[in-house]
Image (cartoon, rainbow, N blue to C red):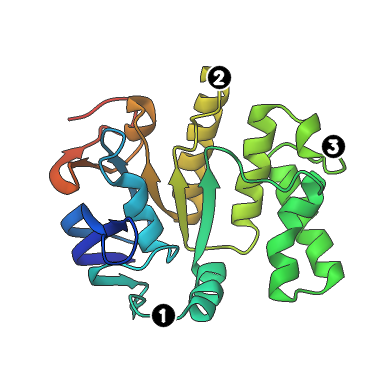
């Protein structure tokens, strides 16, 4: 589903002519199979989020190749990336990234609006997903009227609304208490088992990492170790 080959990335800091090059990722190689949950761990600043941004096209790699669902996406234009991203990826963020002026229903519905889906179908699909995540009675509420756990469920429903084959998550439980964290992790397992959705999850939390079929460690911008997760709260 996702193959990363010899990926390198660097940031350039400072004014032109006086730039300083800061290497971030070095020779990253990664293969995520369809239906797999892969978690990536590492200290803050190790390059985890940069890797996710490169895979999802929000940054362009300095060197290397990224193939998603058989397509080399390394040199897609911004317009091509926008269309491809909407088709292939759903996103779960630590900060939820909900639009505060839109209701829960409108936030979930938004990707379908962008895809040009007709109003009747949008209503049916949005209502069905809100029910699935246990928020069917809260569709008319704004994000500021919802708890952290409820907001994260809205963001998950929005990520699922276009039936993406891959969900990318960046510290998805970072804003949740322990009860809501466990609820979210159970839901991720359920989506993976029932629908075969592929997950690539960035985390520093051992509990989150433990749901992966594999856990990869990034250290100083290099992929240095692969751990096999027991899948139920520990590593083998």
Q: Position of residue 219 (x, y in %)?
A: 17, 40
Number of marks drawn: 3
Query: Which structural element holds mark 2?
Result: helix
Which residue occupies the foreground of this view, 102 or 30? 102
Q: What element carries label 1?
A: loop
Q: Which of 232 and 180 is in front in this view?
A: 180
- As helix, strand or loop, the secondary structure at mark 3 comes to loop
Q: In this view, does 68 lie to the left or right of 161?
A: left
Q: Nearer the viewer, residue 181 or 20?
A: 20
Q: First in sequence, mark 2 or 1: give its number.
A: 1
Dot 2, crowdedness within 10 Å: few (<14), some or many (≥20)?
A: few
Residue 95 coordinates in the image, percent (x, y): 57, 38
Residue identifier under label 2: 179
Residue 137, label in figure: 3
Image disc number at residue 76: 1
| Whole-percent x, y for residue 57 in the image | 42, 66
Residue at the location (76% across, 30% down)? 146
Question: Where on the picture, by quarter, is residue 131?
Answer: top right
- Give the alpha-carbon distance from disc 2 to disc 1, as whole Å: 40 Å
The CA distance from mark 2 to mark 3 is 21 Å
Residue 34 in view here: yes
Give the quadrant of the N terminus: bottom left
Please name the residue shown 34% across and 60% down the image: 15
């Amino acid at each position: 589903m996702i193959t990363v080959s010899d990926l390198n990335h660097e940031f350039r800091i400072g004014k032109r002519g006086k730039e300083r090059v800061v290497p971030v990722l070095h020779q990253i190689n990664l293969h995520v199979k369809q239906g797999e949950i892969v978690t990536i761990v590492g200290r803050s600043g190790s390059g985890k989020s940069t890797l996710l941004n490169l895979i999802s096209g929000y940054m362009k790699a300095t060197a290397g190749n990224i193939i998603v669902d058989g397509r080399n996406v390394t040199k897609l234009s911004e317009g091509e990336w926008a269309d491809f991203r909407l088709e292939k990826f759903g996103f779960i963020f630590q900060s939820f990234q909900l639009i505060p002026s839109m209701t829960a229903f409108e936030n979930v519905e938004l990707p379908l609006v962008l895809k040009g889906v007709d109003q009747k179908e949008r209503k049916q699909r949005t209502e069905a997903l809100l029910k699935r995540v246990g928020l069917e009675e809260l569709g008319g509420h704004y994000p500021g009227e919802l708890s952290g756990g409820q907001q994260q469920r809205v963001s998950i429903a929005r990520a699922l609304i276009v039936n993406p084959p891959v969900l990318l998550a960046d510290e998805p439980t970072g804003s949740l208490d322990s009860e809501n964290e466990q609820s979210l992790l159970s839901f991720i397992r359920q989506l993976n088992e029932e629908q075969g959705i592929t997950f690539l999850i960035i985390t520093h939390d051992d509990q989150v990492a433990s749901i992966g079929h594999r856990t990869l460690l990034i250290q100083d911008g290099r992929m240095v170790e692969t751990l096999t997760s027991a899948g139920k709260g520990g590593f083998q």
